[in-house]
Image: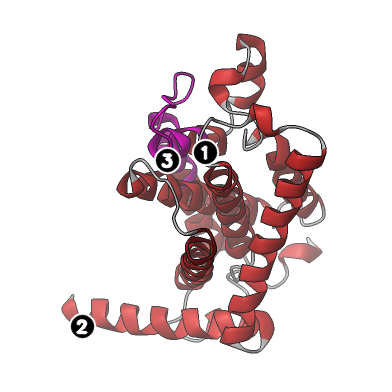
Amino acid sequence: MLGAAVTFVELLYHSIVRDIRKQSGNAALGFFIVMAQSLVMLAVFALMYTVLGLRTLAIRGDFVVFLLTGIFLLLTHNRAIQSVMKGASPTDPMNLHTPMNTLLSIAATALSGLYMNIMSIVVILFVVNMLRGSLELYNPAGLLLPFFFAWASGVAIGMLFLVARPFAPRVVPILSQMYRRANMITSGKMLPANYMTAGMVQWFSWNPLFHVIDQSRGEAFVNYTPLRSNMEYPIYFTIVALTLGLMVEAWLRKNMSASWGKR
């Protein structure tokens, strides 16, 4: 068992490195692309809040922290979905060579995306801290759990899209893109949950990212206590969705063939 575990970790490491290099041909270039995307979105939303006069909707405190807690978690969630959906199918040529398998491929793509996100966030926070002098965070350690489940829930949803793709190869990518676009609104990154009416919350509360972002702001701001969100929902949602995705993936691994799309 120890030997198998060591072999799995070694294969996972090489798969992660291969996936990072495959994305842009160069690991450093891929990192800068991810960081640039985050910076561009941060700048766009800061400009939008300023021009449209929406800063009154933000939580009283550090406005940059308000933007970061929404944008970073949104990008982490959406990138996790995209990463997992790139996971190889059972008929992929790479998975025909043992001990490589689909679970290893999916884990590698998910962890490579997480690694790139963590590195870009660390660098951006360092730069922002250097330029502004400091960042006002109420409980920095408390932000780790919301960040992890922003990624984990994205992995779980990506698994559902991945295992559904063989049954509807043209429809599933469209649905995935629609979901990621809808997260721009339904994630609640622009408006804190406590500021919403009861009717508005019903349109947002189905989304695990909505709960994660709101809980992260409760940890980032001393004067904000989340009243309409919780961490239990994204945790249970992630466990259930990931379990369903793994069950279907195990069935596909045994039954899917190269002639699947020709049936």
Residue designated by label 1: 213
x 20%, y 83%: residue? 3
Q: Main secondary structure of the magenta part?
A: helix
Q: Which residues are magenta?
A: 214-242
- Marks 1 and 3 sit apart, C-alpha to C-alpha, by 10 Å
Q: Nearer the viewer, residue 198 or 174?
A: 198
- Marks 2 and 1 sit apart, C-alpha to C-alpha, by 40 Å
Q: Position of residue 44 (x, y in %)?
A: 76, 52
Task: Say what secondary structure mark 3 lies in.
Answer: helix
Task: Say what secondary structure mark 1 lies in.
Answer: helix
Q: Nearer the viewer, residue 111 or 5?
A: 111
Residue designated by label 3: 220
- Tell me if residue 124 is in the magenta stretch: no
Q: Is residue 92 visible?
A: no
Q: Which amino acid, by three-letter code, is at mark 2?
A: Gly
Circle 2 or circle 3, nearest the eye: 3
Q: Is residue 38 left or right of residue 144?
A: right
Q: Which mark is residue 3?
A: 2
* Quadrant in which the N terminus appears: bottom left
Q: Classify 10 Å Cα crowding around label 2: few (below 14), some (14-19), many (20 and above).
A: few
Circle 1 or circle 3, nearest the eye: 3
Chain-order first, disc 2 or disc 3:
2
